[in-house]
Amino acid sequence: MSPELVTELPRHLLSIADLNHDQALLILDTAEELAKISDAPIKKLPTLRGRTIVNLFYEDSTRTRISFEAAAKRLSADVINFSAKGSSVSKGESLKDTALTLQAMGADAVILRHPESGAANRLAGWTNGVVINAGDGTHEHPTQALLDAFTIRRHLGTVGGDLEGKHIAIVGDVLHSRVARSNVLLLTLLGAKVTLVAPPTLIPVGVESWPVQISYAIDQVLPEVDAVMMLRVQSERMQNSFFPSTREYSRLFGLNLDRMNLLKNEALILHPGPMNRGLEISAECADGVHSVILEQVANGVSVRMAVLYLLLGGNIGVGS
Amino acid sequence: MSPELVTELPRHLLSIADLNHDQALLILDTAEELAKISDAPIKKLPTLRGRTIVNLFYEDSTRTRISFEAAAKRLSADVINFSAKGSSVSKGESLKDTALTLQAMGADAVILRHPESGAANRLAGWTNGVVINAGDGTHEHPTQALLDAFTIRRHLGTVGGDLEGKHIAIVGDVLHSRVARSNVLLLTLLGAKVTLVAPPTLIPVGVESWPVQISYAIDQVLPEVDAVMMLRVQSERMQNSFFPSTREYSRLFGLNLDRMNLLKNEALILHPGPMNRGLEISAECADGVHSVILEQVANGVSVRMAVLYLLLGGNIGVGS
Amino acid sequence: MSTYLIKDVELVNGEKVAIGIADGVIAEISSKPTGSYDKVLDGSGCVALPGLVDLHTHLREPGREDAETVLTGTRAAARGGYTAVFAMANTDPVADTAGVVEQVVRLGREAGWCEVFAVGAVTKDLAGESMAELGAMAHSAAQVRVFSDDGKCVSDSQMMRRALEYVRQFDGVVAQHAQDPKLTVNAQMNEGSVSARLGLRGWPAVAEEGIIARDVLLASHVKSRLHICHVSTAGSVDIIRWAKSRGIDVTAEVTPHHLLLSDELVESYDPKFKVNPPLRSNEDIAALRMGLADGTIDIVATDHAPHPAEDKECEWAGAANGMIGLETALSVVQKTMVDTGLLNWSQVAGRMSITPAIIGRAKGQGVALAVGAPANICIYDPNQSQVVVAAEQISKSKNTPFVGMDLPGQVRHVFFQGKPTMISTQMVAR
Amino acid sequence: MSTYLIKDVELVNGEKVAIGIADGVIAEISSKPTGSYDKVLDGSGCVALPGLVDLHTHLREPGREDAETVLTGTRAAARGGYTAVFAMANTDPVADTAGVVEQVVRLGREAGWCEVFAVGAVTKDLAGESMAELGAMAHSAAQVRVFSDDGKCVSDSQMMRRALEYVRQFDGVVAQHAQDPKLTVNAQMNEGSVSARLGLRGWPAVAEEGIIARDVLLASHVKSRLHICHVSTAGSVDIIRWAKSRGIDVTAEVTPHHLLLSDELVESYDPKFKVNPPLRSNEDIAALRMGLADGTIDIVATDHAPHPAEDKECEWAGAANGMIGLETALSVVQKTMVDTGLLNWSQVAGRMSITPAIIGRAKGQGVALAVGAPANICIYDPNQSQVVVAAEQISKSKNTPFVGMDLPGQVRHVFFQGKPTMISTQMVAR
């Protein structure tokens, strides 16, 4: 892997839209390389020794924070966890002041999870360090999409290749899902066909400009896809009449045993977690033969290592 | 007074609109005749001996009920007071059943006060007796208008004549006022010019079809009128934002000493009562030299005697 | 199943034919019929229409069987020439679950007088606060496609938006009762010169028009299908015309009573003229007729609203809103639209049968008469006339505003799925 | 009072003249001036406009003097060529009493940079629940004629109706901030393809358009005067055009920023582009320009909304809505409307001075330049251009969205009631 390739990546990872096809593949390929380390007896590379990475989390997300932390530590970086409460919206310390503070403390990278869309973009404007978006509001969650694509490629694609010709359904609350936004961008960037399945209330107005198909009939879509990604649905959406009841949502859009049987044999079931078992996905599906949900978690560490490696590694090659 | 004239009146007195110019004058002239009885030592005529008149009051109005009762008794009729609670709206005995009951009891006339517009019209369809509207909702109160016209004529008009050329302002909550509706009809029928003065919120949409002028500036109107009739304003109208506050209402539309001084010397101040002193009228005005408010009350009995006499008296002449 | 031949009847294009009916379908339409039929009926002087379809009927069952039942209401519908009605959701319990809509459809099928489609409530208990299980109703045996809180307006704009979006997934339509509740608190009649005189609280046209304007804009924004119930004002017609010119997917209905009766009738204070939306001005009536003629208003729907006598024999404010209309609808349309030259019979068939069936996705209904089509037929004699007598209405309730009026036309024969429901103006026992 | 002669300036009709100013009025307009004057100013290359009138300015005083004061805001207005501004009511305390509106007008008079008219709140504390004492404000020394809850919508339709009716008694106008609150809970930007991509909660066009549609219908029903603040969507333009074609007494304004900036700028997530109503699509911008050109939109108003830096230096959702605009308004109008050939200078004078003064009943303002007219004059050089620098804005707040843009034109001299507030692009000390 040459230094030239590494420098192709953008400075920050704020959105999948910042990546082109080759850059996306580079991350996936690097993750494949780095995944081997996880299988090695000593799961550690010295690449980021002496670098300081801050996990700046304005939302609780143990799963994502630990994944980034593990990834950083396997690259020998120093990790500082900063669980911030509040935001400008709720009048805590301002994000800008926090950013300047972290920079003064010498943070090389800030991994930001924030309840407001665009927070990572704002942060990137206030800091010299690298900013990695670990989920901003209902905007994007690029490393989740990368780990999803990584997982799908491992099962359905070719090593080093993309997802050309694959058909993936994303089912559920697309409107409020940063996972869906990043995945739509990444999966289509990699050549896959994407179908969104959701009640029309949970699909954003303006979706016409997205390179996807829309369906309201999950039973018609499932037999045709190579993978189905179930999105978490928050039951409080009911109160805003996005749907009448969790019962109806589950009946119309939930993945259950009958529907799982509509899938092709080799089709995958993904879920970014945490799951609402019994709402968007039944236990049989979550734990069944199609499910790669736990693999997604494992792959998350590799993909995040790749991202940290490529954004922070500078001119240090793998294994150097 | 010939029997022919008497039979010219409509069967019921539901609305001033049922009267023509001559009929209205007949009532006023008859009231003048009957008023003399009030000055006689024995204030009683045998005209309606043996007749039964029911005061059917669905609203508390001691003032109007007593006035009708006195009028009926001076004509020797038997009076039954029936204070009904509720209506079809609030699910008491239905007005129709009450009407049929009264008819079965031999009532010759029903004097109806009711919170709903049109109740008198409905009653007239269910009974053989005479119906006199003593105020129905926000529709009409014909005897009030007759007593107002009677009072004005006594001061400003000619005996036996009408109100041709007189200019009368009606100030206040025209929208909700049955007094205003009856007065607009009667005063203009008698040749007077009528100007309504009120905030636009308290003038009904559709007023363009009324034979009146509209003004929002009481100070401009007062110097021009021969009489000003102040309407009762209910302070709860404020809650529905017909006006912002009683303070502002009073400042913009209330009759106070300064405004009273704008009146011509001979101009009259009328009020149908009960007054909200300090809101639509100040004490100085209510009790001042222009006020004929107490005369209105006294004249009410004469006018109501005339109405009962003419509607129920059949072919029995005055004093027979 | 008996077979029938209706002779000497005119099609809507004026062609004189005989129509043969066998096995539930139209077996032949011909000037020289060749089939043999069990019974021959006289169609002379009559026009043959596809069975009428009413998109807006209150059958009152379950809950107010004292006013109407599915059986009595559909029988009245058959008498009026209808072969399908859409039963509104404001029953007790409200038709806001799969169970109730399936029950209503089943009662209709058992009664056998015409087809009953159920309208589902948009919000639970018509309360306007949370969405009913529209999907459950759509996917139930009742196959609901029309959703309405009729009688109440879906006034919360966000709720209306969500409902419009949500029904798109099963090709549904939200039928809006357009009435801004804030502008019509305790409203009694059209706000205008008559209400000013009568002292009855006004129901301003803007309360209808403002909601329609908002809803066409919402439908446009979320690209959904919207239907406007009982349009009653000139301004509403204007707004719908504007919306259609912008390509917005909106349809609209007008009732027979709004085509004929004006608010001047309220001068009597007789609640038989009390209806919601209220009777409007003569200018409104003229605009409604023009709107129906030019297609701005797509259909006629009755808003048949039965009420027992005691709910009308009281003072105006205490009386119930509503008028029955199934049995007189076609006659009123003839009087207001056909005899005035505004519509021909082909257009009447469109506005009272074909288009309502399309809006409601009523399969097998509203099909133009043709060989092989379902035998849902209304044979109507426009040359008769009759004075409306309340007691002669076969609806369980008698609250017709047309009582005493001389209305043209008479339904002579009606076939529903190949079986007669009326022959020679007489109901056929089921 | 010194006398002035502005030489070699063009009138809006292209005529080259000199304008003499004495005793607060225009003493002469002539190609060969005869009077003698204390000072002579160069007007070459400039067009002479009547002093601009802004119907929509947030001066923030009382209550948010950290963002702007009457003094700083009117000074910024003078720099932008304005001789009158209408100060919006959403101060703290709210301008919902005679006391506050009189205070604001008095502060304006003391500052002396331009005339300040106070806008009164429609409802007490802008809460939308009960009517403020509109009559008291109208009859106060401030002589309020424009009433607005700007920043909040008078969303209750009955309240809006009453307000429209009530202000008719003193020839007032209700200026509506059209925003259906139900459709815009926590809304962040225009709802469309950009919001879909950015994951920012949508502020749908229909939330503005639905209120405008309702309000023009209300104004029509009660025959009152309505003004629509900061129109931002193509649909709104269409509705207002429709309303005007029906003779409804409605006027409307557009802001400079809605004429120039689109929602694509939000891709930066930089809150300097956060404003309410939000920046819209390019189709909307095109429609707004056409609407302003053809008179559907009557005027340009700035919605000058100063905010301190900390209210913008945060994540998008936490940032305040609003942009300053007084100092750049004329340049933006030149760029979007004049340089594009959509308006000539005479029409600019109409839309930025004469008509806003008429709508606001601002006596002595918005008077076309003529001998004897009040000397409220803006001498503007359309041939200059300048890059907008935030720090150079003299408003107390620097939140201009135009920062870094090269805008045409420069205000050279401004006279307010015969006294210069700006000479040769320099503010004149008061």
Image (cartoon, coloured by chain):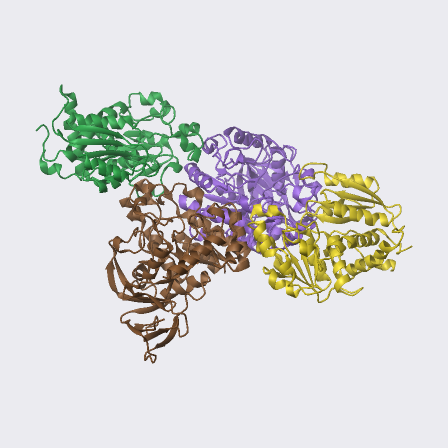
Chain colours: A yellow, B green, C brown, D purple
Q: Is residue D90 left or right of residue A33?
A: left
Q: Residue furthest top?
A: B41
Q: Position of residue C272 (x, y in %)?
A: 30, 48
Specify whether residue C353 is in view: yes
Q: Position of residue B245 (x, y in %)?
A: 44, 30
Q: Residue furthest right?
A: A320
The quadrant of the rendering that contains the C terminus of chain B is top left
Vertical relation: D115 (above or below) B259: below
Q: Position of residue B267 (x, y in %)?
A: 28, 27
- Taking depth in this image into account, of B3 and D143 the one nearest to the observer is B3
- Taking depth in this image into account, of D228 and B164 the one nearest to the observer is D228
Specify whether residue D250 is in view: no
- Taking depth in this image into account, of B42 and C361 the one nearest to the observer is C361
Q: Is residue D240 left or right of residue D314?
A: left
Q: Is residue C295 left or right of residue D114?
A: left
Image quadrant where residue D86 sits: top right
The quadrant of the rendering that contains the N terminus of chain B is top left
Number of labels in the image equals 0
Vertical relation: C295 (above or below) C61: below
